[in-house]
Amino acid sequence: MRGSIALSAALMTALLVGVVGAAWLTSGALASMNATAVAAGDVDIGPLIDDASFLGIAARNLSVVALLAAGIPLLGIPTLLSLPVSAMIVGFAGASVVASLGLPLTLDRVGTYIVLELGGIVLGAAAGVLPTVHASRRALVRAHAGRFADAYTAAILPALGVSVVAAALILLGAAIEAAAITALA
């Protein structure tokens, strides 16, 4: 019985790591292409985008949140590994757009949705590390390492709730962004 539980856990972990790895590589490649397109001057119709529709924008942005939230069952590791890269890409893309358009025009074009999308990304990252931070704090305060697993498990549901809020912000931002791109076209 114990062997089958261990084997199931190992297989699920391997599957999760594979999915997270694929999402990480895909999301990194897409973000890199996006930053390159922005640097080349493609600042209105986003990059990658033959598809500036709501679904296309939502899929790209949700992939970033999913990657960050993937840390929930994996001790926050995918979140901590991908957050610096995501932050650099967002920062580079933002700086490129501001350099190309100037701050007033940039705020006019993206200000309505960027706060929602960035908020969604931040909440996705918070969700990814929430169980680990909660469990670590509990274990340190109570000085019982055995409480780590209980505290970790207890924090998974709230972390998933934060992920849902992050996804909702991303979807709302994507709807506004798609409308803004359509209005510019």
Image: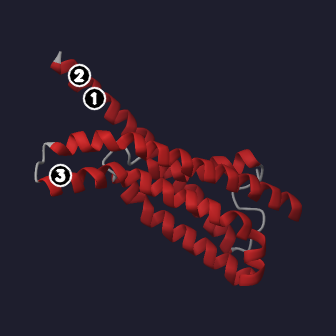
Residue 129 is tagged as none
Query: Cβ–Cβ below 8 Å for labels 1 and 2?
Result: yes
Query: Cβ–Cβ below 8 Å for labels 1 and 3?
Result: no
Please, what secondary structure does the residue beneath circle 2 have?
helix
- Mark 1 to mark 2 CA distance (whole Å): 6 Å
Residue found at x 45% / y 57%? 125
**Residue 23 showing in the rendered view:** no
Q: Position of residue 127 (x, y in %)?
A: 43, 51
Q: Quadrant of the C terminus?
A: bottom right
Place residue 79 in its image quadrant.
Answer: bottom left
Q: Earlier in the sequence, mark 2 or mark 3?
A: 2
> Which of the two discs, 2 and 3, sits closer to the camera?
3
**For mark 3, what is the residue?**
139
Q: Earlier in the sequence, mark 1 or mark 3?
A: 1
**For mark 1, what is the residue?**
9
| Amino acid at the residue labelled 3 | Ala
Residue 5 is tagged as 2
| Amino acid at the residue labelled 1 | Ala
Residue found at x 16% / y 20%? 2
Q: Position of residue 111 (x, y in %)?
A: 71, 70
Place residue 90 in its image quadrant.
Answer: bottom right
Please, what secondary structure does the residue beneath circle 3 have?
helix
- Mark 2 to mark 3 CA distance (whole Å): 26 Å
Q: Is residue 117 left or right of residue 148?
A: right
Q: Position of residue 138 (x, y in %)?
A: 21, 52
Estimate how packed mark 3 is, as few (under 14), some (14 to 19) or many (20 or more) residues with alpha carbons within 10 Å.
Answer: some
| Amino acid at the residue labelled 2 | Ile
- Mark 1 to mark 3 CA distance (whole Å): 24 Å
Q: Position of residue 57 (x, y in %)?
A: 69, 52
Q: Is residue 84 left or right of residue 42?
A: left
> Which of the two discs, 1 and 3, sits closer to the camera?
3
Q: Does 161 sit above or below residue 5?
A: below
